[in-house]
Image (cartoon, coloured by chain):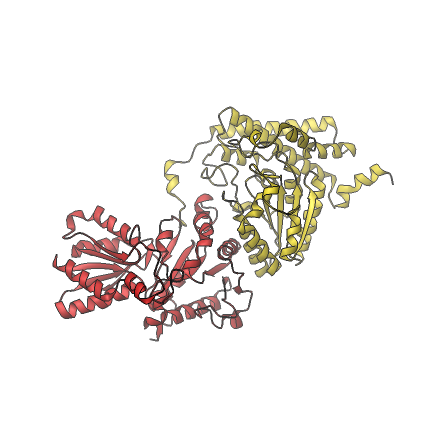
């Protein structure tokens, strides 16, 4: 078998069809283009606040794609645009949140953008304080195990989150009870401006899993298939009663922390430029092209389709109404 | 009708709730093998098993955070914080997560958890086994806060808390655990959260108190009736969030005088809010300034008995204040 043929086998060896590989690419590209459009809208003064996911597409799509939509649970953090798109949120849904419109399915314009949640899609609502969602993921996994259900919970966070007590307490609890939960660390090397070396005295987050009694794996977070492989293995293990897994995906965020941040104060342009050379979207496109799953014309067609979808979404949300003022008083408690 | 003390009532009520509903789990430090340091879950492990009676790691944030996740997964968790003084590591999970989950999701998610915690002084617990923390949480929209003072209320409020679709903090006064007894019906019943109880009818002045202070007020009111023929109305709000303003303000409108007795620090406590509402809404009905009695602004009671006694209002002090207000 030639080297090229061996490489071609990669997604197939993971049980992914060509159509699925192309769908993963579409999710990655759609997230990247939505992110870029959001920044453009921010610079036009139309989107007051943007959290960027650019650079994280491989680890987000690769891990999220291993879950079963409809029965598994997504517990994202605020950078997980591609995760929630895999879970089922559309560009229109996301932009309704960016524009804080009444129809925003995640929170009706109450939270800042990127604080997703959707009961129907199994996306658990999140807040802003770091790592608070991680015990929720473990507790949810406890309930699934207790009820003898087949679901698996996946929980995403950055490496900064691993400094919080919530993170340690959740991994400890998940290890004790061997819960069906997969912890995914998107290690982009910075918690806003603070580098990994000031967050922890160990080389990897993954090695910490040993302290909680389960496996930790480190993968290239810019390789969508590597992320999928690690996540699928962990999800299968969790579903079969094998307990939790920690997966650390090394990646990079190309933009500042948010549209309110200026990353020039803490990292060089050369460093960012170098990171962009490992762009996960381009890398997966190269793979697909190399194996004739997509050509330039088809890539252009996909890009244009996403662009048209985005244009339609922007037009829709710009016309969408704000919530009624009185809505601010609703849903403090259950409304019968 | 059986007569029980407060802690046995809580034990028996949780037992019945768990026996009748498999969604109910209890989690906390020492709740399993030990049966809780106050024995609230004594025998639960043998009866319900370790899946439902969860001895947690020693981490309060974890107890509440995992409880929230369990509630999201369809369970009805009762989280036990061993002492209210130790609830602070869980403050963020309670205030930012449990309380706001419904609001922040525009009603898409709820958080039906109960958090039980023993509070209050009078048991020589020093600074860290005596605190009253209800006002810290009463300030937070999205939380319900109940403080049963009698066994009857303890049973009815615990059932109501468990089946409430929102997070409920259920604070139990340690001094009342074995010192307060009362009749408790065998059958299931609920005391609706947000309904006060007129514990003693009267027409001269209204006294509002809960927990240990309610019992001190009842003692003082009985003495005042016997010695001075002054009838004081004593009201137990039973929950401070939501507060039964209709009952409280209706009583003060009737008697024209109000006194609030809390064990917590007086400044910015529950009494301050009650006093403010009375001032706002009943200014023209009042025959005297509102009287507030509460602890001094020191961090709960010191260990030494002399110092602890200084902190806590006594029935004698309450009696004197009632008499003075009645004669105003």
Image coords of residue B161 (percent x, y) = 40, 59
x then y, percent, for residue A43: 52, 25
When the figure is inspected, residue B263 is found, relative to residue B1, above or below; the finding is above
Instruction: Out of B288 and A160, give the one closest to the viewer.
Output: A160
Q: Quick one: B13 or B308, which is closer to the camera?
A: B308
Q: Residue furthest top?
A: A44
Residue furthest out toward the bottom: B2
- Farthest residue to the right: give it: A1
Horizontal placement of A8 versus A255: left or right? right
Give x and y (percent) for residue B3.
Answer: 34, 75
Which hue belongs to chain A? yellow
What x and y, as percent, mark residue A69? 61, 46
Q: Nearer the viewer, residue A139 or B131?
A: B131
Could you tell me how many numbered marks the image carries? 0
The N terminus of chain A is located in which quarter?
Answer: top right
Residue visible at 38% across and 54% down in the picture? B144
Residue A112 in view here: yes
Query: Which residue is located at x 72 percent, y 43 percent?
Result: A226
Image quarter of residue A312: top right
Give the chain ID for the red colour: B
**Residue at horizontal 38 percent and vertical 60 percent from the top:** B127
Quarter of the image for residue A196 reads top right
In the rendered image, the vertical position of residue A171 relative to residue B213, given as above or below: above
Question: Would residue A158 be seen by someone viewing this image from the given angle?
Answer: no
Q: Is residue A201 left or right of residue B291?
A: right
């Amino acid at each position: 078998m030639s080297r090229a043929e061996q490489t071609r086998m990669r997604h197939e060896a993971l049980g992914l069809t060509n159509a699925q590989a192309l769908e993963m690419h579409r999710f990655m590209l759609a997230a990247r283009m939505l992110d870029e459009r959001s920044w453009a809208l921010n610079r036009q003064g139309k989107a007051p606040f943007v959290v960027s996911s650019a650079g994280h597409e491989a680890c987000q799509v690769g891990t999220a794609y291993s879950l079963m939509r409809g029965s598994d649970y997504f517990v994202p953090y605020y950078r997980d645009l591609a995760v929630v798109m895999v879970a089922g949120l559309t560009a229109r849904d996301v932009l309704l949140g960016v524009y804080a419109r009444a129809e925003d399915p995640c929170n009706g314009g109450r939270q800042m953008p990127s604080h997703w949640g959707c009961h129907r899609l199994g996306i658990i609502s999140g807040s802003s304080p770091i790592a608070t969602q991680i015990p929720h993921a473990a507790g949810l996994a406890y309930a699934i195990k207790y009820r003898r259900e087949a679901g698996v919970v996946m929980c995403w966070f950055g490496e900064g989150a691993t400094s919080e007590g919530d993170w340690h307490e959740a991994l400890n609890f998940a290890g004790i009870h061997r819960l069906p939960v997969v912890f995914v660390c998107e290690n982009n090397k910075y918690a806003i401006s603070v580098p990994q070396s000031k967050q922890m005295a160990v080389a990897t987050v993954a090695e910490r899993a040993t302290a909680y009694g389960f496996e930790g794996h480190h993968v290239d977070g810019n390789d969508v298939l590597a992320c999928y492989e690690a996540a699928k293995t962990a999800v299968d293990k969790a579903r079969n009663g094998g307990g939790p897994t920690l997966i650390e995906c090394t990646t990079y965020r190309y933009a500042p922390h948010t549209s309110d941040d200026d990353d020039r104060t803490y990292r060089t342009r050369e460093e960012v430029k170098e990171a962009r050379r490992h762009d996960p979207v381009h890398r997966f496109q190269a793979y697909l092209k190399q194996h004739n799953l997509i050509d330039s014309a088809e890539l252009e067609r996909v890009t244009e389709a996403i662009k048209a979808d985005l244009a339609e979404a922007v037009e829709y949300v710009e016309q969408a109404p704000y919530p009624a003022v009185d809505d601010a008083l609703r849903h403090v408690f259950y409304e019968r | 009708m059986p007569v029980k003390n407060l802690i046995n009532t809580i034990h028996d009520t949780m037992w019945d709730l768990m026996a009748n509903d498999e969604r109910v789990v209890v989690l906390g430090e020492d709740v399993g093998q030990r049966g809780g340091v106050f024995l609230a879950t004594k025998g639960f492990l043998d009866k319900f098993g370790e899946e439902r009676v969860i001895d947690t790691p020693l981490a309060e944030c974890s107890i509440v955070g995992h409880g929230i996740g369990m509630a999201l997964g369809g369970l009805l968790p009762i989280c036990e914080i061993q002492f209210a003084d130790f609830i602070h590591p869980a403050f963020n999970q309670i205030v930012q997560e449990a309380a706001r989950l419904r609001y922040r999701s525009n009603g898409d998610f709820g958080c039906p958890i109960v958090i039980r915690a023993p509070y209050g002084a009078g048991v020589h617990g020093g600074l860290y086994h005596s605190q009253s923390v209800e006002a810290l949480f009463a300030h937070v929209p999205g939380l319900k806060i109940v403080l049963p003072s009698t066994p009857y209320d303890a049973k009815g409020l615990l059932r109501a808390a468990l089946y409430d679709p929102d997070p409920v903090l259920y604070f139990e006064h340690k001094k009342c655990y074995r010192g307060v007894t009362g009749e408790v019906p065998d059958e299931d019943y609920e005391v609706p959260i947000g309904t006060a109880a007129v514990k003693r009818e009267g027409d001269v002045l209204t006294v509002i108190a809960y927990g240990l202070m309610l019992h001190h007020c009842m003692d003082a009111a009985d003495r005042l009736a016997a010695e001075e023929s002054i009838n004081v109305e004593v009201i137990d709000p039973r929950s401070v969030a939501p507060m039964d303003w209709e009952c409280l303000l209706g009583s003060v409108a009737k008697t024209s005088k109000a006194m609030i007795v809390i064990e917590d620090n007086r400044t910015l406590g529950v009494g301050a809010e009650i006093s403010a509402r009375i001032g706002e809404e009943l200014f023209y009905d009042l025959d005297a300034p509102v009287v507030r009695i509460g602890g001094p602004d020191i961090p709960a009671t010191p260990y030494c008995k002399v110092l602890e006694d200084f902190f806590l209002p006594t029935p004698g002090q309450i009696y004197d204040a009632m008499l003075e207000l009645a004669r105003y």
